[in-house]
Amino acid sequence: MIRLVRAEWTKLFTTRVWLGLLLGACAMAGGFAALFTGFAGRTGNNGQALPDVGTSAYEQAAFAVSANATVLLLILGIIGMTQEYRHRTATPTFLVTPRRGRVVVAKLLAYALAAVPIGLLVIATNVLVVEIYAGARGAAPSLTGDNLRVLAGAWAALVIYAVIGVGIGALLRNQVGAIVGALVYLFVVEGIVIRAIPAIAPLFKWLPGGALQAMTATLDATDLLDPWQGALLLIGYGLVAAVLGTLFAVRRDIT
Amino acid sequence: MSTPSAREPVRVEVRGLSKSFGAVRAVSDLGFTVEPGSVTGFLGPNGAGKTTTLRMVLGLERPDAGTATFNGAPYASLPEPARTVGAVLETAFHPARSGRNHLRVYCRAAGLPLSRADEVLTEVGLAEAGRRRAGGYSLGMRQRLALATALLGDPPVLVLDEPANGLDPEGIQWLRGFLRHLAHEQGRTVLVSSHLLAEVEQTVDRVVIVGAGRLVREASIEQLRSGADGAGTVLVRSPDADRLADVLRAGGSTVTQVDDGALTVAGSTPADVGRRAFAAGIELHELRSHTSGLEEIYFELTAGREQFAAHSPAATTDPGAAR
């Protein structure tokens, strides 16, 4: 299994996809952190004031923005799995490892482990921007207590979303379909539709987006699971997708 | 590269293999054997089920029935498949990855030293291009990269699906020599598919001919040649065919009447037939030696067995035109 995981890393780091997504994720985390800090304490159009620099509400929310970059790690995982079909390398891959479930397990492990340092760089960018900008505005947040918990949650979420991406890729096989489907689900289905319908809104906390919010404190944190519950739920979603994908999609004929 | 004696001979046995895609029967109860130390040509027209068969042999597609084994073991239960079987199927690589890195991925996965990547690149003549993106490779270079991938584990068995596709004449020449070298000097089992007999005629020792997913003929190339109608015969056409036939028979030749004035003459040469016709004062309209006959028998064996046979009257009466 170790050699299969290393083979996956060789695949990952011999094209530039990971670099593009890493830079994108860092830019996203840094950009959101800057926006959030810039508007801290201002009053929005709806008359609600954003928490000001120096408050714990601001600090936790500013450290949670990295969680927005989970979508890019999701895409990293999806590409990692679906590129085998897109570029037809599934043929040599499954020739070397005819027991295809082992390939899926190797990818889950390889992307989880690769996402640890990638996620750390994203978190580091987030922290750097917040410390400098909020510091310039008078109150650099401390890296202790709840702030640290939020950062750890965001880091873990980044790693788990890469795993979910591999699982979705195994299930759907089609790269463009999997990416578009995942984005539409996260931003349209979960982000708008479910929360807009009161009858099913309570379901939100059990869904991937709700579980993600549970892992990091946010402004509108209301009815959510505990962070560890959210993490377990997300890992569960990723593994269920991977198992279903292995059973029903990956074992299909490679033609 | 290990010595031939160190490599265990592996026999590939296909028994009762069947596969349908919906209502289309791609492969029906197909069975044949591929012997070590020889090159076996897997021949048939396009759509005869060659690729589907090879992919089932390699565990990439699941047969509806039947088995394919390597010294008794199916592909999926080989302990180190890359060290037993090398396969060249459609060229598959990530366009942004260099040829060398592509090979290193499979070195890692198969537990081989990374140095094997450079060794096989040299073996197939790609050492120079190894560090370039594979997406920029020519068709011939892609085939060579696919062959290099197959050779990584130094396997006793090689399975190649239409490896000559995209190769220039020089590349085809090189491939022929390379396959013969792999089988005859290194004792490997080589199975190579093609839809053109002429392409592999000089390379293969044995042939397995399929049509419409069924076995048509399994034989050595000599057996096929000796069984070919018209091999080593002369075709002669004359307005006075009956008299010519008598003259030739009187000279001890076996003569067969073909049609409107054409005869085939066995045990003779065009010069001999021409001389005897001239001596008897018989007018000739055509005089030529038959081709090797392999192409004809291949065509006869597979005629009308294409999955999507087009109606072409010329093709059935004049096999030579198909070339």
Image (cartoon, coloured by chain):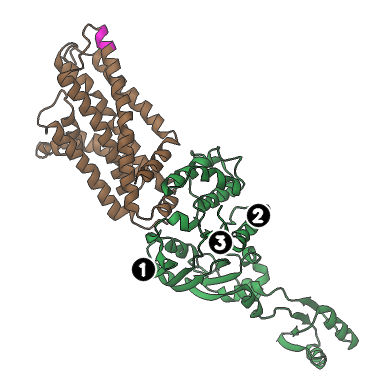
Chain colours: A brown, B green
Give the secondary structure at mark 2.
helix
Q: For the magenta stretch, what is the residue range?
A: A132-136
Q: Are the residues flagged by discs 2 and 3 in contact, CB closer than 8 Å?
A: no
Chain letter of the residue carrying label 3:
B
Mark 3 closeness class: few <14, some 14–19, many ≥20 residues within 10 Å? few
Can you identify the residue that label 3 sits on?
B5
What amino acid type is highlighted by mark number 1?
A: Asp
Query: What is the number of the mark on residue A50?
Result: none
**Mark closer to the chain start, 1 or 2:** 1
**What is the chief secondary structure element of the magenta stretch?**
helix
Q: Nearer the viewer, mark 2 or mark 3?
A: 3
Residue B306 seen in this snapshot = yes
Q: Who comes first in sequence, dot 1 or dot 3?
A: 3
Q: Name the residue beneath numbered marker 1.
A: B64
1 and 3 marks in contact (CB < 8 Å): no
Label 3 SS: helix
Cα distance between the residues tagged 1 and 2: 38 Å
Q: Quadrant of residue B127?
A: top right
- Tell me where residue B244 appears, x and y as whole percent: 81, 89
Residue A228, by quadrant, is: top left
Q: Residue under mark 1: which chain is it in? A: B
The type of residue carrying mark 2 is Trp
Residue placed under numbered mark 2 in the picture: B174
Tag in front: 1 or 3: 3
The verdict on residue B101 being magenta is no
Horizontal arrangement in the rendering, residue B313 relative to residue A39 (left or right): right
Nearest the camera: B59 or A183?
A: B59
Q: Is residue A133 magenta?
A: yes
